[in-house]
Image: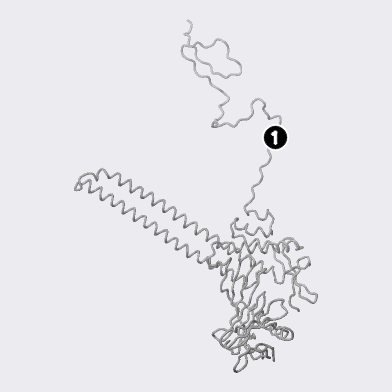
């Protein structure tokens, strides 16, 4: 089956993507989560040490004030004769208090220094983790909108070394070492006749025994060796030398993208020539263009063999010392947000990001990524850090809410029935303690001894026990 030629959106409309953006997005989330957690720990460690230092200094100031108070309290005793008991005790107490406070202050400051060293080591580990996370990302993927330049040059070991220099429009740059497979054409020093059997080009040559002069003569480029190859978006520079170790005379061939010719610079045995670049056009340019295309293809093949990250910077600041690594994540997310939103809009399956890979021969292959899977990658992040992904617009407000159970709304008050309403005395919450109701039968208290009992009958409905009369009995 043919190799992939491009990608379509989920609705089968053309997209500008040439690589598997879905796979990149999955790994980009893993990278972003790891960097955000490292950034969070870095900020927390810095704040913790600063707070400890501030609190310690305040405590030391309070202790020093205590020392001053002790000294003032002992002033009266120190006014006594120096050989007196009170003066000797006061002197020793003052000196002891001063020494004690100084020792405690030194110990507290040492503890702060120890904590600062411990925090610095933890922060160094986190910064190293940021670099390793970025290395894992760029080893597997080419960042969207990034430009790469491949440089191949002879090394002292006698073989070629290759590097990839890449950068983005938002200030992120990195350098990677490329591996040269043993089966590759650049695995050994390349003589040009292995690429083009006979390459003869009219080029400047110095001649004459008495009066040295430069003449244009046919030159056998196929007898030269590739000493250096630099390929970037602006063009290509090919350095050809006579010796296999990159020494001797030769030529530098400079191709500018879009130009109808190439610049040729003659290199003498001892170093570069002072001659102006010679313009190669016509048939000779076509010959050199063929050489260029073959060498450029070799260099681009090496771009698929990334070996290790040599360094990375953001706005010329190394990621190893970047104060806030989360800025890297924020810039990457801001860069990819438009294409993520476009993929989501053109995906016909709700909750998925879908792309269709064009394989050729009327074949397509669908790749997709669940939004729920991406959301699950954020579970270990605090809510404030999750908002870093808001520009992607992948989740609704309800799905971004915390996972704690929602509080049920309070029911609306139900009006009481009319028969229970009391227009005169509305119910009032009482603050008095509850009292057990009294029994139905009530007993009246005994009257005072001098009081006469009432002669009238007791009102009906009362339950009073008969009481003995206070009058003497009649004869």
Q: Nearer the viewer, residue 68 or 101?
A: 68
**284 w.r.t. 140: above or below:** below
Which image quarter is the N terminus in? bottom right
Question: Which residue in the rendered view is the most extreme toward the left?
Answer: 83
Q: Nearer the viewer, residue 217 or 129?
A: 217
Where is residue 317, by image quadrant?
Answer: bottom right
Where is residue 366, by image quadrant?
Answer: bottom right
Q: Is residue 396 left or right of residue 72?
A: right
SS state under label 1: loop
How many C-alpha atoms fall within 10 Å of the one at disc 1: few (<14), some, or many (≥20)?
few
Question: Which residue in the rendered view is the most extreme toward the top?
Answer: 475
Which x, y percent locates residue 242? Answer: 60, 90
Where is residue 388, by image quadrant?
Answer: bottom right
**77 w.r.t. 244: above or below:** above
- At 47% from the left and 54% from the top, the residue drawn is 51
Q: Mark 1 = which residue? A: 415
Which x, y percent locates residue 341? Answer: 71, 61
């Amino acid at each position: 089956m043919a190799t992939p030629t491009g990608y379509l959106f989920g609705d089968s409309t053309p997209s500008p993507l040439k690589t598997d953006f879905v796979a990149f997005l999955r790994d980009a989330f893993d990278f972003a989560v790891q960097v955000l957690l490292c950034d969070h720990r870095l900020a927390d460690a810095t704040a913790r040490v600063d707070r400890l230092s501030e609190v310690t200094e305040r405590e030391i100031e309070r202790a020093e004030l205590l020392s001053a108070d002790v000294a003032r309290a002992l002033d009266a005793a120190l006014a006594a004769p120096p050989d007196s008991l009170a003066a000797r005790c006061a002197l020793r107490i003052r000196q002891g208090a001063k020494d004690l406070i100084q020792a405690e202050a030194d110990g507290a400051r040492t503890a702060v220094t120890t904590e600062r060293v411990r925090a610095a080591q933890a922060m160094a580990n986190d910064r190293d983790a940021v670099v390793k996370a970025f290395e894992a990302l760029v080893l597997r993927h080419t960042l969207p909108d990034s430009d790469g330049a491949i440089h191949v040059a002879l090394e002292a070991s006698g073989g070629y070394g290759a590097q990839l220099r890449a950068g983005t429009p938002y200030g992120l740059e990195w350098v990677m070492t490329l591996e040269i497979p043993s089966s590759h054409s650049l695995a050994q020093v390349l003589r040009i006749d292995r690429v083009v059997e006979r390459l003869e080009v009219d080029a400047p040559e110095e001649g004459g025994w008495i009066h040295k002069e430069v003449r244009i003569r046919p030159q056998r480029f196929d007898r030269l060796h590739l000493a250096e190859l630099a390929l970037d978006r602006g063009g290509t520079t090919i350095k050809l030398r006579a010796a296999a170790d990159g020494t001797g005379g030769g030529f530098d061939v400079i191709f500018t993208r879009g130009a109808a010719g190439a610049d040729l610079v003659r290199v003498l045995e001892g170093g570069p020539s002072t001659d102006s670049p010679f313009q190669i056009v016509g048939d000779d340019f076509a010959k050199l263009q063929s050489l260029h295309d073959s060498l450029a293809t070799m260099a681009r093949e090496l771009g698929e063999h990334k070996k290790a990250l040599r360094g990375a910077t953001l706005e010329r600041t190394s990621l190893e010392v970047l104060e806030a690594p989360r800025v890297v994540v924020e810039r990457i997310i801001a860069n990819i947000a438009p294409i993520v939103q476009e993929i989501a809009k053109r995906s016909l399956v709700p909750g998925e990001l879908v792309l269709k890979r064009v394989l050729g021969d009327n074949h397509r292959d669908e790749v997709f990524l669940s939004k729920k899977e991406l959301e699950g990658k954020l579970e270990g992040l605090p809510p404030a850090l999750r908002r870093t992904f808001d520009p992607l617009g992948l989740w609704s407000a309800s799905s971004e809410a915390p996972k704690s159970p929602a509080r049920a709304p309070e029911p609306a008050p139900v009006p009481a029935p009319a028969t229970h309403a009391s227009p005169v005395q509305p119910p009032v919450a009482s603050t008095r303690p509850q009292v057990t109701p009294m029994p139905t039968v009530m007993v009246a208290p005994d009257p005072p001894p001098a009081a006469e009992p009432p002669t009238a009958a007791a009102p009906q409905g009362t339950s009073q026990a008969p009481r003995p009369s206070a009058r003497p009995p009649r004869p």
